[in-house]
Amino acid sequence: MHPTPIRDAARTAGYVLDDAQRAAAGRLEALLGTTGRPRALDILDREGEAGRGVYLWGPVGRGKTWLLDRFHEQSGGPRFHFHEFYRALHAEVWARTGTPDAMDRALDALLGDARVLCFDELHLHDAGDAMLLSRALRTLLGRRVTLVATSNYPPQGLLPDPLFHELAEPLIALLESSLDVLEVAGPVDYRTLRPVHGTAVPEAPSAPRWRDGAALVRTGLPDRPAPHEATDVPLSGGRSIRALRAADGAVWFDFAGLCAAPVSALDMLSLAERFDRWVLSDVVPFADCHVNTQQRFVSLVDVLYDRDLPLVLTAPGPLDAVLSVPPGRPAPPDLARAVSRLHQLGSGRPAPAGRTGRG
């Protein structure tokens, strides 16, 4: 009888996987093999070739990252979120600019001799990202590395801007030819559900210990900073960002001061490495925000969520109303994912046991 470690983990946690989730779990378990010792080096076929990878995609809140994390627990090897991987890859390649094997050496530094790579939330909205990742994937396949990735987009949906989509076509072709593409479809965003009569539902991938504050939950907020506590927090390139308070590993930003400032997702990652407790106060309704401001907020939610860092938000009204973008106005492509995650945070549910690091 074949082992079913991912489905067993769901049963142990009290989760009832739906049909699409069970199919994805079965495919990932098949990739782990039947050796009884399913570590990274066992993901090989009889000729010693890498196992065919898996690309899980579907709407927000479908448990894709939960499935990836259970696979990662069994397989070992590195696990990256897109923002984190791209920042690290870009830095390693840049440091080797001008050398003919820059990509090989960059991947050596990031992955060592890993034979499996878990890659969460692959999404492309930048042409440069697409071209760099295409080079990286081609090199990984040449090394017989098995890739397991999650995304809210099918491969053909990556870099959807018609002006630049053709630049992603080489990457899309590689993904479709080297990975089994599975849709984890379904109408239910499990992050928005509450347990009913003690019955568990499949959790979202990783439920960090966050709280939402003020208009969302009016309890547990720390004291608002005094004016003299404001300080400039350094960023790369000699830049800085003004924080209302930054001390003892905690940081408090005003929404406009952080999200309307010229900071990138890579800056958010850098800040998340320095501060492990966050407050973002006075969230401005998205109806009154530029799309770039909205996107920075989405990036912040992604970064903190992936690192399991606590966040307190204050806002002038209910979450759905504050983060709603009027029809006909531009909105960040991944806003639905951020809203779904914040709904989960507001539910007060604890993180599932067994959450692992990124590797």
Image (cartoon, helix red, strand yellow):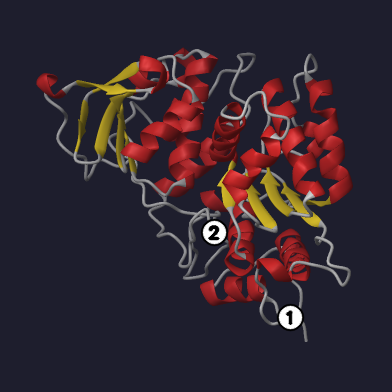
Q: Report, in whole angstroms, how far the alpha carbon at label 1 lies from the one at label 2.
A: 29 Å
**Residue type of the residue flagged with mark 2:** Glu
| Residue 343 seen | no
Q: Residue at x 77, y 42 (%)?
A: 139
Residue 274 in the image: state x and y as whole percent. Answer: 32, 38
Q: Residue at x 54, y 16 (%)?
A: 291
Q: Residues within 10 Å of mark 2 (few under 14, many from 20)?
A: many
- Residue 203, disc: 2
Looking at the rendered structure, the secondary structure element under dot 2 is loop
Residue 25 in the image: state x and y as whole percent. Answer: 71, 65
Looking at the rendered structure, the secondary structure element under dot 1 is loop
Question: N-terminal of the two: label 1 or label 2?
Answer: 1
State which quadrant residue 327 falls in: top right
Horizontal arrangement in the rendering, residue 279 relative to residue 72 (left or right): left
- Residue 236, disc: none
In this figure, which residue is indicated by the disc labeled 1? 35
Question: In this rendering, which labeled residue sits more in front, label 1 or label 2?
Answer: 1
State which quadrant residue 48 falls in: bottom right
Comparing 162 with 172, the one in front is 172
